[in-house]
Amino acid sequence: PRYWSIALYADNSDNFFVINDREAAGKPIDIVLIGPKAYPQAPALPAGASVIDAPSARGLLLMRVLVADYAAEKSVVEAARGTLRCEALG
């Protein structure tokens, strides 16, 4: 059995968002964080993205992955972890 979750924390350590593998139902997750300073003009959002209002300009993303046998599943887990990215919308 596998389990993963992504949790977002504000700069004061308050948790403000969590999603896990069951909620994602096997679909890719695309999250757009909007910080406390509003954009002068709303950015174009990727199709299907979830917009999350972040309570602070800085914070932390914590990803947890639980697998039964890491040695046997390392290539799959590391490939999935390698797809995480953080970039500004432009």
Image (cartoon, grey):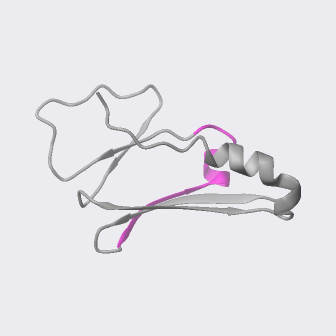
* Image quarter (top left, top right, bottom left or bottom right) of the C terminus: top left
Residue 20 in the image: state x and y as whole percent. 61, 56
Residue 2 in the image: state x and y as whole percent. 78, 58
- Going 61% across and 44% down the picture, which residue do you hit? 82
Residue 39 in the image: state x and y as whole percent. 16, 38
Q: Is residue 42 magenta?
A: no
Q: How many marks?
A: 0
Q: Is residue 77 above or below residue 48?
A: below
Give the magenta part as a residue range.
Answer: 14-28
Residue 72 location, quadrant:
bottom right
Residue 1 location, quadrant:
bottom right
- Going 70% across and 49% down the picture, which residue do you hit? 78
Q: Is residue 24 magenta?
A: yes
Q: Residue furthest left?
A: 40
41 with respect to 90 (left or right): left
- Going 10% across and 34% down the picture, which residue do you hit? 40
